[in-house]
Image (cartoon, rainbow, N blue to C red):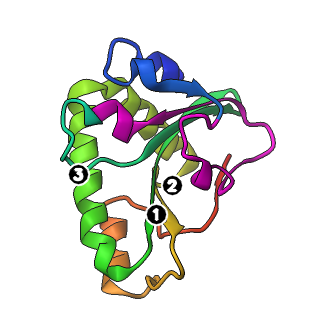
């Protein structure tokens, strides 16, 4: 099941675009595709969910791809990577997960299968802004890890 399949019949359905087309231009180049990645699609979750909940926090994007004969999915939030933003990231993840659990459980199932196969969290923080001030030995890093959010990175590579 691809991300497009998982979105069928959900509020995400009309927002699945080919490649990185659903990702804002300033974020596209920070998301690389590794060798063997095919069938890339993306969803702007904020656009998909803004009509029904314009003030609710949402993660920015879902991306789906195939690699090694398996469909995969990550959720990506482009956000300044400062410790003062950790609470907002946790809130956004919680709200987005609840919304997906209610509206698009197949997308969450695809992400869970990806997490299991890659042995890595699927909630990815794409660092924006001047600098990253979150480091692995900080309490903020432990909060992120507990929530299943990968430490902020300037570049993400789909594999």
Above or below, comparing residue 58 to residue 47 in the picture: below
Q: For the residues labelled 3 and 1, say whether their Cβ atoms are less than 8 Å apart.
A: no
- Label 3: state its secondary structure: helix
- Label 2: state its secondary structure: loop
Above or below, comparing residue 80 to residue 118 in the picture: below
Q: Label 1 crowding class (10 Å Cα cut-off): few <14, some 14-19, many 20+?
A: some
- Label 1: state its secondary structure: loop
Q: Is residue 59 left or right of residue 1?
A: left
Q: For the residues labelled 2 and 1, say whether their Cβ atoms are less than 8 Å apart.
A: yes
Reply yes or no: does residue 48 show up in magenta: yes
Magenta part of the chain: 20-49
Q: Quadrant of residue 110?
A: top left
Q: Label 2 crowding class (10 Å Cα cut-off): few <14, some 14-19, many 20+?
A: few
> What whole-number distance in Å separates the C-alpha atoms at marks 3 and 2?
18 Å
Q: Quadrant of residue 96?
A: top left
Residue 143 in percent (x, y) is at: 29, 72
Q: What residue would you read off at disc 2?
A: 120
* Mark nearer the viewer, 2 or 1: 1
Residue 29 in percent (x, y) is at: 69, 53
Q: Residue at x 26, y 65 (%)?
A: 88
Q: What residue would you read off at disc 3?
A: 94
> What whole-number distance in Å separates the C-alpha atoms at marks 2 and 1?
8 Å
Instruction: Confirm whether residue 112 shows in the render.
Output: yes
Instruction: Confirm whether residue 7 shows in the render.
Output: no
Q: What residue would you read off at disc 1?
A: 150
Q: Is residue 30 left or right of residue 123?
A: right
Q: Is residue 17 left or right of residue 53?
A: right
Q: For the residues labelled 3 and 2, say whether their Cβ atoms are less than 8 Å apart.
A: no
* Mark nearer the viewer, 3 or 2: 3
Q: Residue at x 58, y 54 (%)?
A: 27
Q: Which numbered tag is attached to residue 138?
A: none
Q: Residue at x 40, y 14 (%)?
A: 8
């Amino acid at each position: 099941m691809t991300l497009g399949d998982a979105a069928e019949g959900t509020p995400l359905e009309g927002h699945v675009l080919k490649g990185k087309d659903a990702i804002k231009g300033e974020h596209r180049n920070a998301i690389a595709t590794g060798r063997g990645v095919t069938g890339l699609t993306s969803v702007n979750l904020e656009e998909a969910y803004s009509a029904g909940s314009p003030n609710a926090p949402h993660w920015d994007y879902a991306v789906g791809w195939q690699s090694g004969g398996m469909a995969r999915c990550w959720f990506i939030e482009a956000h300044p990577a400062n410790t003062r933003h950790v609470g907002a990231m946790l809130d956004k993840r919680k709200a987005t997960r609840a919304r997906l659990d209610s509206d698009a459980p197949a997308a969450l199932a695809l992400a869970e299968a990806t997490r299991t196969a890659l042995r890595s969290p699927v909630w990815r923080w794409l660092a924006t802004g001047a600098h990253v001030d979150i480091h692995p030995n900080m309490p903020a890093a432990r909060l992120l890890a507990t929530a299943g959010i990968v430490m902020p990175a300037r570049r993400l590579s789909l594999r």
